[in-house]
Amino acid sequence: MTTAPETQRPDIEQRQRTFSWSDPVAIASAGAGLSGAEFFAAIAEGRIPPPPVMRALDFDAVSFGEGRAAFRLTPREFHYNPLGTVHGGVFATMLDSACGCAVHTMLPAGVFYTSLDLSVKFLRPVTVDTGPITAEGTVVHLGRRTALAEARITDAAGKVHVTATSSCLVMRAE
């Protein structure tokens, strides 16, 4: 196994990024007692801050509706993998968010979900030259115990770069 050296190469310029986020426990508490639709309306209106993962990866909420959620990201170098393209984990996070939040928009107060799986298909690479990309998720099926959602990442021209399907476990108070 090879490990990275502790010192950086002096011939490769270093870049830096800082960001801040809101307390995730306070976000969850603020959403307690709200339906999914009410929770996302509060985020969209700025009454509840977005979750920390959105700040960490620098993506924004675009829209929420019944059974729908969309997020936008402008690719930056800090999203890159060693090959010089956006890392697949960034796409997976956006798609998991789009699928899960689409399901969440349809849940009443006191009902929650968690992702059971996420199947991602990478169709074409994304770089900073691609420009903004949007992950749009929709609910395919909402049952009493499970939900199925699908999402896709497209560029401004409508080209599909990545697709996903997700199963979610719906947790209801019994």
Image (cartoon, helix red, strand yellow):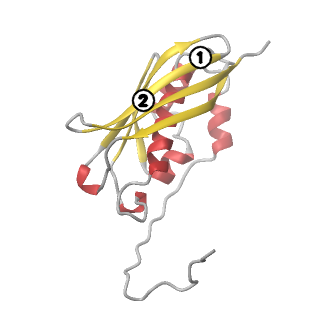
**Quadrant in which the C terminus appears:** top right
Task: Name the quadrant of the N terminus.
Answer: bottom right
- Mark 1, Cα crowd under 10 Å, few <14 / some 14-19 / many 20+, is many
Residue 141: x, y in percent?
A: 52, 13
How many numbered marks are there?
2
Q: Alpha-carbon distance for marks 2 and 1?
A: 18 Å
Query: Residue at the location (56% across, 78% down)?
Result: 4
Give the quarter of the image for residue 76.
bottom left
Q: Earlier in the sequence, mark 2 or mark 1?
A: 1
Q: Which residue reaches farthest left?
A: 157
Q: Is residue 139 above or below residue 24?
A: above
Residue 151 is marked as: 2
Which residue appears at 61% of the width and 11% of the height?
A: 143
Report whether 121 appears left or right of 26. Answer: left
Query: Marks 1 and 2: in contact by CB < 8 Å?
Result: no
Residue 17's x, y, as percent? Answer: 45, 66
Which quadrant holds residue 13? bottom left
Q: Position of residue 99 (x, y in %)?
A: 50, 29
For label 1, the residue is 107
Question: Is 80 on the left or on the right of 142, as rendered?
Answer: left
* Above-or-below relation of 104 to 62: above
Callout 1: SS? loop
Secondary structure beneath label 2: strand
Q: Residue at x 38, y 63 (%)?
A: 83
Q: Residue at x 49, y 59 (%)?
A: 19
Circle 2: residue type: Ala
119, 23: nearer the viewer:
119
Q: Nearer the viewer, residue 103 or 62?
A: 103
Q: Is residue 47 left or right of residue 108?
A: left
Between tags 2 and 1, which lies in front?
2
